[in-house]
Image: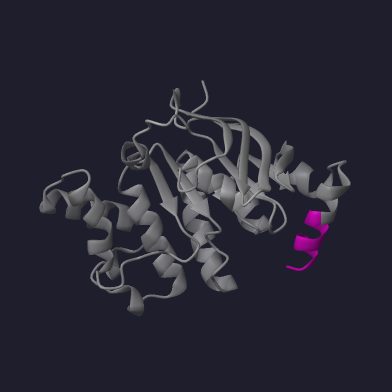
Amino acid sequence: MALIDVQDLIKRFDGKEVLKGVTMSLSEGQSKVVMGASGCGKSTLLKCLNLLVSPTSGRIIFKGEDITRPDMDIHRLRQDIGFVFQHFALYTHLTVEENITLGLRKIKKMKTAAAREKAAFELERVGMIEHRNKYPAHLSGGQKQRAAIVRALAMDPAVLFLDEPTSALDPQMSREVVTVINKLYLDNITMLCVTHDPFLAKYISDSIVFMHEGVVVAEDVAERLFYEHEDPRVRQFYLSVIDHR
């Protein structure tokens, strides 16, 4: 059984249909990337899966449970889904360690010592342990994003969502974050990532879901999707993003 099963998902904003019947799935231990041109519905899909945005219709089955039902406990759901935002969303008045331990203490009710130990373990995992007592203002963009990834991972979610995790970074910082996410991929962390970056997509995915104007039009491994796909919409997109790198 899939960890996430999306069935004919539709989302309208002010009468405009942004998602037009998306169907896809994600299994435990699998990593998928969602790509497509700006405005195709990628980020809206991710936010619907976390119920940051309410779907208009369709079903989302998560761990065998229909999470689109009216009485769904959203707070409980989000404890199982780690979310990494494009612009980090770190609390600027808290240190890196405090950003990570906040959820562990408040939501998971861990003792402070245990929360700090968990934070240290995850920071070591991504090469950030020496920055544990720094505030976000004293970190580079790549370090901020790594701290945000650690904050999500520390909660031991069933799946990690990443929304354009490298788009706010310069090329060098972007490569740092790609390296970290690739390590998670090799550790079989279940992930769903929205990105425009073909380099990131290639190195962190089992397959890539390609969206066009609110629907999934293709899903395949990176090499076939980038260079061999028969759909002209897919070919044109990858020619443009790869040629401009």
The x, y position of residue 222, in whole percent, is 71, 45
Viewer-closest of 181 and 58 = 58
Please name the residue shown 36% across and 39% down the image.
74
User: Who is closer to the viewer here, 86 or 205?
Assistant: 86
Relative to 74, 167 lies left or right: right
Name the outermost residue toward the top.
1
Q: Residue 15: x percent and y percent?
A: 66, 48
Q: Quadrant of residue 24?
A: top right
* Residue 106: image location, x then y, percent: 19, 50
Does the magenta-highlighted stretch encompass residue 238?
A: yes
- Give the number of marks: 0
Residue 65 visible (yes or no)? yes
Start and end of the magenta stretch? Answer: 237-245
The colour scheme used here is one colour
Q: Position of residue 177 (x, y in %)?
A: 49, 61
Picture residue at 39% right of the left edge, 64% below the top: 89
Q: Is residue 241 magenta?
A: yes
**Magenta span dominant secondary structure:** helix
- In this rendering, the answer to whether 202 lies above or below 133 is above
- Vertically, is 147 above or below 218? below
